[in-house]
């Protein structure tokens, strides 16, 4: 998030605050939502393993991916 804050000319804290104010979620939550949406499409349209879907979706750890995915589809 520091990179995005720098690009926008804001401090990291202010960037997170404004992002959440505008979108209703933190930047990390938003990014994870986008990754999970992509993972859902992969799971529906391909025969990849969970580890592959996790990696293709940008999650470095498949356990973390599983936890985020479970929370988002409840």
Image (tube, rainbow, N blue to C red):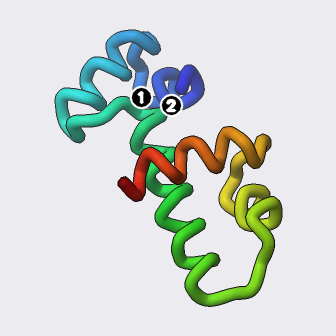
Q: Nearer the viewer, mark 1 or mark 2?
A: 2
Q: CA distance from mark 1 to mark 2?
A: 6 Å
- Rendering quarter of residue 57: bottom right
Q: Is residue 22 above or below residue 58?
A: above
The residue shown at (71%, 47%) is: 59
Location of residue 63 (image quadrant): top right
Q: Which residue: 42% across, 37% down?
A: 29
**Residue 20, relative to residue 62: is it above or below?**
above
The kind of secondary structure element at disc 1 is loop
Nearest the camera: 61 or 57? Answer: 61
Quadrant, the C terminus: bottom left
- In front of the other: 6 or 58: 58
Using the image as rendered, state which of residue 74 and residue 2 is in the foreground: 74
Residue 55, label in figure: none
Q: Quadrant of residue 73?
A: bottom left
- Whether tag 1 and tag 2 are in contact, CB under 8 A, the answer is yes
Q: Which residue is located at x 56 percent, y 21 percent?
A: 2
Relative image position of residue 49 (x, y in whole percent) = 79, 71
From the viewer's perspective, tell me whether residue 7 is left or right of residue 58: left
Picture coordinates of residue 61, whole percent (x, y):
77, 42
Task: Please give the residue where the numbered disc 1 appears in the rendered image.
Answer: 8
Q: Which mark is residue 4?
A: 2
């Amino acid at each position: 998030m520091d990179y995005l804050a720098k690009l926008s000319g804001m401090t990291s804290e202010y960037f997170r605050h404004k992002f959440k104010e505008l979108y209703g979620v933190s930047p990390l939550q938003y990014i994870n939502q986008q990754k999970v949406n992509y993972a859902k499409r992969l799971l529906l349209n391909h025969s990849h393993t969970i580890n592959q879907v996790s990696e293709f979706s940008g999650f470095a750890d498949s356990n973390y991916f599983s936890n985020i995915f479970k929370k988002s589809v409840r």
